[in-house]
Image: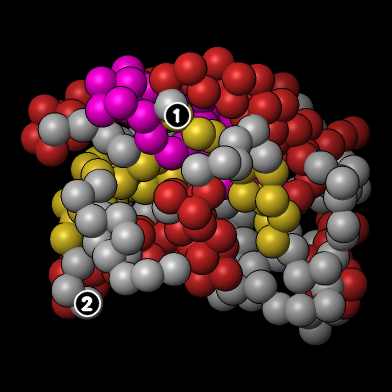
């Protein structure tokens, strides 16, 4: 992929103050896009913007809570007014925030857990796409990339609601690809499993899914054992960059798993 292939593009990256979202923001800026860094933490967002600028890129911070549709809508409106539109939307964040729920067996969930999984892993994506879509139409097209978990494609113990919510997002991606194609907007999903440099920050989950004091056993350790290759945040960013670039103009409605060979879904 050539340098500055995204010059003159406005890219919004949600949940971009750390880990996967931050890696995506840095990558898109390196390719020439003006990147809008979204997050709830102003300090972390400002630091991400500074990091991009130090590397020669251009970025701005926009504060909004992805779980609050009115905040997301107001943010997208500000971006349109200040930057003239939106060309690229990479929807990350919320699913592994410091206050997100961890892996639980269905029997251990309460109603708040169930609603929380759906909100963080699906509704946050819906809010972002709904708010950005009109401004992409006015620009004559665009690229939307959804970030989710491979549990939406492969049944995973402890991720019934996480995977269920993400599976709904993936089906939505396929349906929206048909609708949005009329407006020259492509939409795709990047799915992942364990990311080596983005350790989960979830709270307590079901006991048998957690690692012991020696770091043995548990859901994460079992995933790592089954992976053929390590996956890092920059690997996710590279795939997002492909979907954001002209190289993917013939691709829409697809889900691409970046999981180090953990599973090979069809």
Q: Is residue 6 left or right of residue 212?
A: left
Q: Secondary structure at mark 1?
A: strand
Q: Is residue 42 visible?
A: no
- Residue 202 position in % (x across, y down): 61, 54
124 in the magenta segment: yes
Callout 2: SS: loop
Residue positioned 32% across, 60% down in the render = 5
The spot of residue 163 in percent (x, y) is 77, 39
| Image: magenta residue range | 122-149
Q: Residue at x 27, y 35 (%)?
A: 86
Q: In this figure, which residue is indicated by the disc labeled 1?
A: 185
Position of 124 with respect to 213 (left or right) is left
Report the front residue among 196 and 26: 26
Determine the residue located farthest toward the left in the rendered image: 82
N-term-proximal mark, 1 vs 2? 2
Please name the residue that numbered disc 2 is placed on: 55
Q: Nearer the viewer, mark 1 or mark 2?
A: 1
On screen, residue 55 above or below 45? below
Distance from disc 1 to disc 2, alpha carbons, whole Å, reads 29 Å
User: Is residue 212 left or right of 25 when viewed as pictured?
Assistant: right
Residue 28: x and y in percent read 35, 60
In the rendered image, residue 82 lying in the magenta stretch gets the answer: no
In the image, 172 versus 182, the foreground residue is 182
Q: Residue at x 23, y 72 (%)?
A: 51
């Amino acid at each position: 992929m050539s340098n500055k292939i995204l010059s003159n593009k406005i890219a919004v990256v949600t949940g971009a103050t750390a880990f996967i979202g931050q890696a995506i923001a840095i990558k898109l800026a390196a390719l020439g896009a003006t990147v809008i860094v979204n997050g709830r933490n102003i300090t972390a967002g400002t630091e991400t913007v500074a990091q991009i600028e130090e590397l020669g890129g251009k970025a701005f911070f926009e504060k909004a809570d992805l779980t609050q549709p009115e905040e997301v809508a107001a943010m997208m409106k500000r971006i349109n007014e200040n930057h003239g539109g939106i060309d690229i939307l990479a929807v990350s964040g919320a699913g592994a925030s410091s206050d997100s729920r961890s892996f639980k067996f269905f029997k251990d969930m309460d109603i708040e857990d169930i609603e929380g999984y759906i909100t963080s892993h699906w509704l946050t994506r819906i809010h972002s796409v709904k708010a950005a879509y009109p401004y992409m139409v006015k620009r004559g097209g665009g690229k939307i990339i959804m970030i989710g978990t491979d549990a939406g494609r492969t049944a995973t113990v402890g991720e019934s609601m996480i995977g269920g919510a993400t599976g709904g997002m993936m089906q939505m991606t396929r349906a929206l690809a048909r609708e949005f194609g009329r407006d020259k907007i492509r939409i795709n999903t990047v799915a992942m499993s364990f990311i080596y440099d983005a350790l989960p920050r979830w709270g307590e989950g079901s006991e048998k899914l957690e690692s012991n004091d020696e770091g043995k056993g548990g859901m994460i350790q079992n995933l790592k054992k089954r992976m053929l290759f390590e996956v890092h945040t920059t690997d996710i960013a590279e795939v997002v960059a492909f979907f954001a670039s002209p190289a993917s103009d013939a691709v829409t409605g697809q889900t691409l798993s970046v999981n180090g060979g953990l599973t090979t879904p069809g």
